[in-house]
Image (cartoon, rainbow, N blue to C red):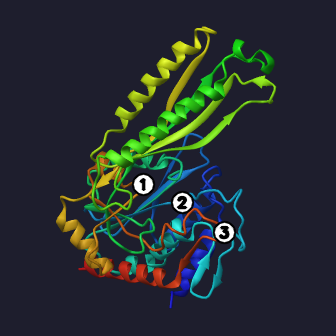
Amino acid sequence: MTRATTTSLLERLIAFDTTSCHANLSMIHFIKQYLEDYGVASKLVFDDTGRKANLYAIIGPQDKPGVMLSGHTDTVPVEGQVWTKPAFTLTQDGDRFYGRGTADMKGFQAVVLQAVPAMVQRKLRLPIHLAFSYDEEIGCIGVRRLIDVMNQQPSQPLCCIIGEPTSMDVVTAHKGKVALAVTVKGKACHSGLAPLGVNAISYAARLINWLDNKASDKQNNGPFEEGYDIPFTTVHVGKLSGGIALNIVPDRCSFSFEIRYINGDNPHQIIDDFMGYADELVREMRLVDPTCKIDTEIVTEYPGLKTTDRADIIEFVQRLAGKNTMNKVNFGTEGGLFDTRLHIPTVVCGPGSMQQGHKPDEFITQSQLEDCELFIDRLLDELTE
């Protein structure tokens, strides 16, 4: 049976609409006050607007390295999805708890927070660090500011456990990601005079076709990395917008694409090749109008994670999880940033499945929450004198 405190905390956390386009301060202030009620101080690291913040706290000896439990507070949108359950009201149906963020990843945060009283009561030989970030879903943005603050500390955590949904399997690697926005500027004219214009949608289509061919090349020819369900770099176009009327040759078209790359691949080579092809098209477009152009911008990027050389950390987390898994996942986390910028060995292990994340009627099972509760109990036992 999931502990009542876990359920009540999850209910509170789900009620906060922390979609990435919204502020997360209501949830952050709730967590801050909750920690203060148990005598735990926390630090908030804000974005430029002051509407969003990371939260960082240390429970236990302040002058020693410890174990960091990390997770993001933001969620993906529910707009455009058809839910049969209320998205921001926790609803239990049998073994399942429904609500936006139950799996990704407020379930983990609820379990961690329910253990705070025990963390405070225990005589910990090493501290537990809590790191809750903003805007992970749109490019791991908020955690970068938190990392800058942590870099100024005299000591860093020994390791980081990110509670993204892995069904409590231990994940030691994931792909990196680069997201890009492309804008094609052509020349508008009446569609009856189409040869006198430069159709931005047509040129965008040629660029997208180039990306599709690159995706096929990666799938067929690699490079490949064993351990992934999708063992190669993927290239994906996710958004497209252009044109204002059927009888007008469009002078503008924009689209966004992403590269999710394995550790042995170089995404910037793909980008360089893409921009080289775009330059070829621009020369062709400017034969009609010299003001035509194609702009390509990197919107966000984060590195992959590959924690394979720290057997001690991996074995430690496997012991907590009661599993000997060393999985790789296709989705990204903040782990690569903790690893590359803070040099903290990082693994991913949390309740729920990404098969339920980002979907209508997102849910987490009671048994997954119970497994995570046991995981945190074991962590406390390991860190208690």
> CA separation, marks 2 and 3?
12 Å
Image coordinates of residue 217 in percent, x first then y, are 38, 42
Q: Residue at x 19, y 61 (%)?
A: 310
Q: Secondary structure at mark 1?
A: loop
> Which comes sooner in the sequence, label 2 or label 3?
3
Q: Label 1 belongs to which residue?
A: 332
Looking at the rendered structure, the kind of residue marked 2 is Thr
On residue 36, which mark appears?
none
Which corner quadrant of the image does residue 191 belong to?
A: top right
Between 307 and 177, the one lying in front of the other is: 177
Between 317 and 185, the one lying in front of the other is: 185
Tell me whether circle 1 and circle 3 mark residues in contact (CB < 8 Å). no
Q: Quick check: can you spot residue 9?
A: yes
Q: Label 2 belongs to which residue?
A: 73
Tell me whether circle 2 and circle 3 mark residues in contact (CB < 8 Å). no
Q: Label 3 belongs to which residue?
A: 15
